[in-house]
Image (cartoon, grey):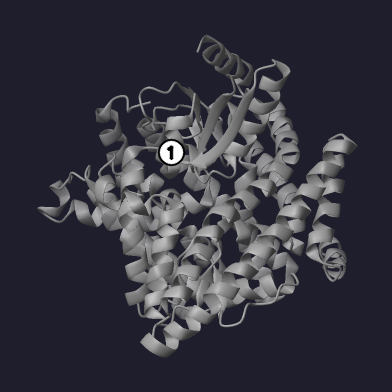
Amino acid sequence: MEAIGNFFQNFLNIGSTVVLPIFIFIFAMILGTKPGRAFRSAVLIGISLTGINIMVQFLGSNLGPAMQKMVDNANLHLDIMDVGWGAVAGTIWATPIGAVGIPVLLIFNIILLYLRQTKTLMIDMWNYHHLVTIGALIYVGTGNFYLGILGTLIGAFITWKLADWSAPFLQKFYNMPGISLPTLSSISSLIIAVPVNALIDHIPGLKDIKGDFASAKKYLGVFGESSSMAIIIGIVIGLIAKYDIKDTLKLAINLAAVMVILPKVVAILMDGLMPISEAAREKLEKKYGEKGDINLGLDSAISIGHPSVITAALILTPFTILLAAILPMNRVLPFTDLASITFRVAFIVALVGGNVFRTLICGIFVIASVLICGTITSPLLTQIFVNSGEALPKGVAGIASFSGGSLFITFSILQLFLRNIWPILICAVIWVAFFLTRKSQQKKSIEINSKLGNPAQ
Amino acid sequence: MRKNILVVCGNGVATSVVASKKIESYLKSQNIDARVSECKVQDVQMYANKVDLIVSMPLSSEYPTNIPVVKGLPFITGRGVEETLLQIKEILTKQ
């Protein structure tokens, strides 16, 4: 396997936007896709990677100078650019680990299902990139391809075990039997949220607050719409950076453009991946679909529509920006991934039975971890980005997102492989706290959600 | 008259793309003139008044009550896709 990785690395010098499509084409053909469709997939993926690069450079050319000014004028070191999970996913696919990621994970899932080590049938192809990111980060951090693969497998194992653990209360909350949600970006929040929630259970007064946040939409609605949110952020940055009116407005519009256009470009990536994902899913379902006691592992996107999730994400958005500014260790400037806060809180909402107040408390801790882990992991992520042939825009110190290395589970595994003592110890404390509280919290959550009856469908 | 369908998803990027491609080609084969667009849950209000049908990937979402909503889950599990497409067609032709 290392041979394939190195072979691929040699070709990367041609440019990942050419090489990855070639690889995708071959993989699609192996899975039995017709040549016409495989070719279309390959080209679409190349197009989307190119598009993502264009958008990231554009974002960087706008934010870079502003970041520099914010450091100069306000001593605000927010110079790591949040490019969003989509851009990070695209970058990760174009690495040696990314190249072999899907087949390796598919085979691993089948093996674990066979050995009855997991009940989750992983048909959520889109979100394989979170798992592959673990390996890609380890690879670039240690230089060892095999350690990278091992890291991805460990991450996959943990994720699917957690998916099995969370399935009972998720199923109850969403009234959907037979599924689990192994999306790492959402599951990662639970490691932190579970102990925090257990703590709240023991604080008199705090534990009974439900809170009525229905009016949140009225006042904070503007943070829900991507374009208006981006305009506000642009204006705020312009003010802090002491831009004149003209430049502030220009910045605002350019940021809004990225906020709306970048997701569209990522959608092209998804369109290109579709035939592969469907072929892989069909093969998996044929082998395991009908077997009893299997949970279909789906994209956590199906869980983010609940009103409590939307309300919590709405309130957390300005909080995130504030946290980014005041957390001493943080250098990430939240932007593109503000839209995905819903994914970070979706499972917390299910854990606490829809209680928005508790979701906010847990959510703040989760967001803090996302920002700090993102800052610490940024050098490695930036290295991957640069390795793919992209130049770092001037004034931008690095890139990050709310997923990638910012996810607590990813961060923990990475630090373990990098053998950094202090991060390992701090992570260990949180993991132990999670282990000690997981059974009782799971039970409580199932109880709360059973009492809820059928949630609005 | 051209029908407008909104597929709602988490990011407006991944799961909704799968659904909209399938819906588009199905409606084309049935000679129904329709335009399918994607958006994320938070942006629904922006598009809601110009839409004839919503296909929702997220469960438990709240939508304007005057617009028919179809569950989009079958498009990601792969089960019940035909029934859902039929359901969409019926709603559109009855309008």
Furthest residue to the left? Answer: A205
Residue A132: x, y in percent?
A: 65, 57
Q: Does the rendering let one see residue B51?
A: yes
Relative to residue A65, is residue A93 depicted above or below?
A: above
Residue A235: x, y in percent?
A: 40, 69
Q: Which amino acid type is marked by label 1?
A: Val
Relative to residue A425, is residue A29 depicted above or below?
A: above
Mark 1 belongs to which subunit?
Answer: B
Instruction: Answer with the quarter of the image where residue B12 lies.
Output: top right
Q: Identify the residue at image location x=73%, y=18%.
A: B29
Residue A78: x, y in percent?
A: 44, 78
Instruction: Answer with the quarter of the image where residue A324 lies.
Output: bottom left
Q: Identify the residue at image location x=58%, y=42%.
A: A117
Q: Residues within 10 Å of mark 1 (few under 14, many from 20)?
A: many
The residue pinned by badge 1 equals B44
Relative to residue B82, is residue A134 depicted above or below?
A: below
Q: Identify the residue at image location x=55%, y=27%.
A: B4
A260 left or right of A98?
left
Q: Identify the residue at image location x=41%, y=66%.
A: A233
Which element is circle 1 on? helix
